[in-house]
Image (cartoon, rainbow, N blue to C red):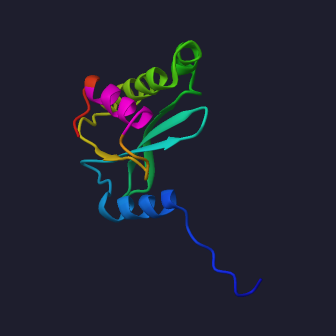
């Protein structure tokens, strides 16, 4: 057991690779995405201060009622719209997109499209 090598999964390696290049600043914070099998979460993070500025998910009150009746990709788009609305309310219109090691496809793309349509630029 002592000689066992623990290998990181492909997702963890991609996540590390993305985070080497993507950093949120005060002027342009990072829009981070986390995807589970049931839910999707989006946060706007200022890495210089280490603070979350805005957050939305399929569990939040604004989105949860609508998301229960929708497909996962459509619910993800609602999450993107919700996080964009919160960020714009706090004066943030430009962000850096952090796909979190996930492939830019499906629900991740839906969040990005929803945020872009609501006014965030990235």
User: Which quarter of the rendering shows the C terminus?
Assistant: top left
Q: Residue furthest right?
A: 1
Q: Position of residue 100 (x, y in %)?
A: 43, 50
Q: Residue furthest bottom?
A: 3
89 is within the stretch colored magenta: no
Residue 22 found in image quarter: bottom left
115 is within the stretch colored magenta: yes
What span is in magenta?
105-116
Q: Residue at x 59, y 27 (%)?
A: 59
Residue 1 vs 7, above or below: the answer is below
Lateral position of residue 82 relative to residue 24, left or right: right
Q: Position of residue 120 (x, y in %)?
A: 26, 32
Lateral position of residue 82 relative to residue 91, left or right: right
Residue 102 vs 17, above or below: the answer is above
Q: Position of residue 95 (x, y in %)?
A: 28, 43
User: Which quarter of the rendering shows the N terminus?
Assistant: bottom right
Q: Residue at x 27, y 23 (%)?
A: 117
Q: Position of residue 83 (x, y in %)?
A: 40, 30
- Magenta span: predominant SS is helix
Residue 47 found in image quarter: bottom left
Q: Choose between 2 and 96: the one closer to the eye.
A: 2
């Amino acid at each position: 057991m002592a000689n066992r090598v623990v290998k990181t999964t492909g997702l963890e390696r991609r996540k590390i690779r993305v985070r080497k290049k993507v950093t949120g600043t005060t002027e342009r914070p990072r829009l981070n995405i986390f995807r589970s099998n049931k839910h999707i979460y989006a946060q706007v993070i200022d890495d210089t201060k280490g603070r979350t500025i805005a957050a939305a998910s399929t569990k939040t009150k604004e989105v949860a009622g609508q998301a229960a009746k929708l497909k996962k990709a459509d619910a993800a788009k609602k999450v993107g719209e919700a996080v964009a609305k919160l960020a714009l309310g706090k004066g943030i219109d430009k962000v850096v997109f952090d796909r979190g090691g996930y492939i830019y496809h499906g629900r991740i793309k839906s969040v990005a499209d929803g945020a872009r349509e609501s006014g965030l630029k990235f």
